[in-house]
Image (cartoon, rainbow, N blue to C red):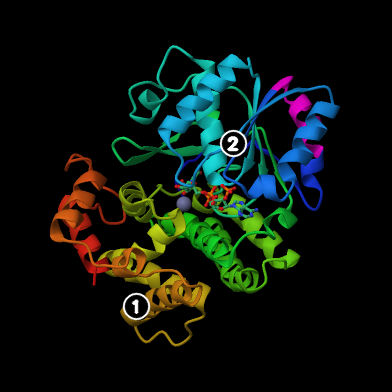
């Protein structure tokens, strides 16, 4: 096991009615003037936004709202949010929504704390994040794990570049997690969330690290749980038990618990971000579309690890040889995504195969013009990324 620091400071209030504690939680973390950020329509339609707003005002807090965050949230909207936070002298940002809303709230919190600097500088690595306003969230979809993660992902809408940053300043102070708030999700959104939750652990599990037993066992338990409850939630979005298992798994899958003591990988996420940035597809489906092509490309680096995954997660029993078991585990995973209605190739994702030029552009961007490799299990240079995108294009 490698040395590690585990820092997961977000206070989690979990269960039915969790959102009713919003005012108390904001006050506990020093908020007096709150900018509430939300998405398109779901929080308005369900009445959640009104309820939260009312409870904040009733507790004597000054409240301003900013709606309109789109999935794959944009830099231009986040900049607008920074101006709004400054104009209202907000000292607390409350996100009501999913990963897109929470990531926008994180960006606004960083931007409003240092108004003289353009927020994209941080995403481009031109400046370190040194401060941020406190952020809290009312979670409405189990997926991105942003409610406890140290990351925030934005898309530069002018250049179609999707980028994330990791900083401890991105950790929300609290996450209010009521599984009932996810009952209004469509089966497609739930399936995208299930895929993303799995991928946050899969992208950590397949690492060169050996002998990391507790972390591996936690990861495998999380994967089995999501594989069991994911389809139940897709079939019946009002299944409280299934939705609560997914909600808790979503947070634990991305607060670093399932990757402690190992190097961070995230190759599939990097491949997927280029697809969302270029084509605007949902995050979860960008991942399922390339996972099998990635896995088949890299598993020979460590067939025993892929065989362990097949055995402990998919109950592949008769292991004649590691290679066969590894391939069976990969196939089962792809079939699971397909059973949820998720795409497992680029033509399924986009409705057409991509041209060579398009594939090349994706690989070029993902490798930052050939200047970086992705992953430690098998460092993937531009030509490797191109081969993976090409395999996913079949
Ligand atoms: O905008 P509204 O109307 O609210 O609709 C949203 C949106 O269309 C809808 N929705 C959310 N809660 C709902 C609901 N509809 C009905 N009932 C509810 N209760 O769901 C759609 C998707 O929402 P979004 O916030 O985009 O989903 P998700 O949580 O999957 O977030 C995806 C974003 O997070 C990033 C992704 O790249 C993507 O941009 N990620 C952020 C991470 C992080 N910060 O740690 C890690 C992830 O790997 C990921 O990259
Ligand atoms: Zn993700």
The residue under the point 38% across, 30% down is 123
Q: Which residue matches tag 2?
A: 67
Q: Is 77 on the left-hand or right-hand side of 63?
A: left
Q: Quadrant of the C terminus?
A: bottom left
The residue under the point 54% across, 17% down is 113
Q: Which residues are magenta?
A: 21-33
Tag 1 near tag 2, CB within 8 Å? no
Q: Is residue 131 visible?
A: no
Q: Is residue 73 visible?
A: yes
Q: Is residue 65 above or below residue 307?
A: above
* Dominant secondary structure (helix, strand or loop) of the stretch shown in magenta: helix
Q: Position of residue 124 (x, y in %)?
A: 33, 29
Q: Quadrant of residue 146?
A: top right
Q: Is residue 344 above or below residue 161?
A: below
Residue 327's label in the rendered image is 1
Residue 14 sits inside the magenta stretch: no
Q: CA distance from mark 1 to mark 2?
A: 45 Å
Q: Is residue 247 above or below residue 64?
A: below
Q: Position of residue 292 (x, y in %)?
A: 34, 69
Q: Position of residue 229 (x, y in %)?
A: 63, 70
Q: Is 291 on the left-hand or right-hand side of 170?
A: left
The residue under the point 49% across, 51% down is 259
């Amino acid at each position: 096991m490698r040395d590690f620091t585990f820092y997961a400071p977000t206070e989690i209030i979990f269960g039915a009615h969790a959102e009713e504690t919003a005012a108390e939680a904001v006050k506990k973390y020093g908020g007096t003037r709150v900018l509430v950020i939300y998405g398109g329509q779901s929080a308005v339609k369900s009445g959640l936004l009104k309820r939260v707003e009312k409870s904040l005002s009733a507790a004597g807090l000054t409240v301003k709202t900013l709606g309109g965050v789109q999935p794959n949230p944009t830099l231009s909207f986040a900049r607008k949010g920074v101006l709004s936070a400054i104009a209202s002298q907000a000292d607390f940002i409350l996100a009501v929504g999913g990963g897109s809303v929470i990531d926008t709230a994180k960006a606004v919190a960083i931007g409003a704390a240092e108004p003289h600097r353009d927020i994209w500088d941080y995403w481009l690595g031109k400046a370190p994040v040194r401060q941020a306003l406190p952020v809290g969230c009312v979670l409405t979809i189990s997926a991105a794990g942003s409610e406890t993660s140290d990351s925030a992902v934005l898309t530069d809408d002018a250049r179609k570049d999707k980028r994330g940053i990791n900083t401890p300043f991105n950790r929300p102070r609290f996450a209010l997690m009521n599984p009932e708030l996810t009952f209004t999700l469509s089966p497609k959104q739930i399936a995208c969330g299930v895929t993303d939750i799995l991928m946050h652990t899969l992208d950590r599990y397949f690492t060169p690290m050996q002998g990391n037993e507790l972390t591996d066992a936690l990861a495998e338990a999380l994967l089995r749980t999501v594989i069991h409850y994911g389809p139940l939630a897709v079939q019946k979005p009002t299944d409280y038990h299934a939705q609560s298992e997914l909600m808790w798994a979503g947070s634990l899958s991305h607060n670093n618990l399932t990757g402690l003591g190992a190097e961070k990988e995230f190759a599939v996420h990097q491949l997927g971000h280029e697809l969302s940035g270029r084509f605007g597809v949902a995050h979860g489906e960008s991942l399922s579309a390339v996972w099998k092509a990635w896995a088949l490309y890299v598993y020979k680096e460590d067939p025993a690890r892929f065989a362990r995954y097949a055995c402990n997660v998919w109950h592949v029993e008769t292991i004649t040889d590691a290679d066969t078991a590894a391939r069976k585990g990969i196939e089962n995973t792809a079939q699971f995504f397909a059973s949820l209605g998720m795409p497992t190739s680029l033509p399924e994702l986009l409705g057409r195969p991509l041209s060579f030029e398009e594939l090349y552009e994706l690989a070029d961007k993902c490798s930052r013009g050939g200047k970086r490799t992705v992953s430690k299990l098998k460092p993937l240079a531009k030509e490797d990324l191109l081969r993976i995108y090409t395999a996913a294009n079949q």
